[in-house]
């Protein structure tokens, strides 16, 4: 019967690190939140930036961020967009503003969805997402500070 649900849970998609993003993923695996910094104007940038949004320089380097952030905005997902997330519905999707300035898309952990408040202080924590080519892939999530 083709209508029968598979009893085997579908795995969540795992991001595949490439050469450009490798320092971010290596840092996450070591419990370090890596972001970009422009060597021309010292602007802090999100990890996915390849050009400075302030001065347009391409001279960016990887630095370790403090991991401290403030919750900028969030949403609660009630719809299943990927079968790998079925067991987690409803789950939160958040945007945090790092102490250094850049904003990251992430998820909050260690807090009930109903207790999430915009403006709350959060701190980075790292969770294993799965593996790619035999390597564990970790991603930063954020939990309430304190």
Image (cartoon, rainbow, N blue to C red):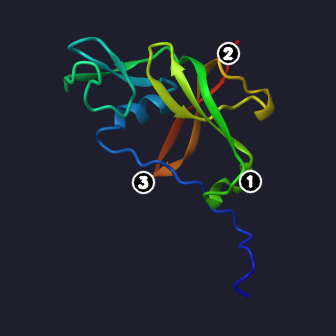
Q: Quadrant of residue 51?
A: top left
Tell me residue 60's x, y (percent). Answer: 25, 23
Would you call the spot at circle 3 few (<14 residues within 10 Å), some (14-19), or many (20 or more)?
few
In this rendering, position of residue 101 left or right of residue 113: left
User: Which residue position holds label 3?
Assistant: 133
Which secondary structure, mark 3? Answer: loop
Q: CA distance from mark 1 to mark 2?
A: 26 Å
Contact between marks 2 and 3 (CB within 8 A): the answer is no
Examine the rendered structure and indicate whether residue 6 appears above or below residue 52. below
Relative height, residue 41 to residue 2 (above, below)? above
Circle 2 sits on which residue? 145
Tell me which label, 1 or 2, sits earlier in the chain: 1
Residue 87 badge: 1
**Label 1 near label 3: C-beta < 8 Å?**
no
Give the total number of marks visible in the rendering: 3
Dot 1 lies on which element?
A: helix
Question: Percent x, y for residue 138?
Answer: 52, 38
Residue drawn at the location 21% of the way across and 24% of the way down? 56
Q: Position of residue 46 (x, y in %)?
A: 40, 27
The percent position of residue 27, horizontal first and vertical second, equals 43, 28
Residue 42 vs residue 130, the one in the foreground: 42
């Amino acid at each position: 019967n083709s209508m029968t649900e598979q009893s085997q849970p579908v795995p969540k998609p795992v991001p595949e690190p490439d050469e450009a993003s490798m320092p971010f993923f290596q840092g996450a695996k070591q419990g370090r939140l890596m972001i970009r910094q422009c060597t021309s104007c010292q602007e802090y940038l999100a990890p996915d930036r390849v050009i400075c949004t302030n001065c347009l320089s391409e001279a960016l380097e990887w630095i370790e961020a403090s991991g401290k952030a403030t919750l900028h905005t969030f949403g609660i997902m009630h719809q299943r967009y990927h079968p790998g997330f079925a067991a987690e519905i409803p789950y939160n999707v958040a945007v945090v503003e790092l102490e250094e300035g850049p904003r990251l898309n992430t998820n909050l952990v260690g807090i009930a969805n109903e207790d999430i408040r915009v403006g709350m202080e959060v701190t980075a924590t790292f969770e294993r997402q799965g593996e790619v080519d035999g390597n564990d892939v970790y991603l930063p999530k954020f939990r309430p500070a304190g």
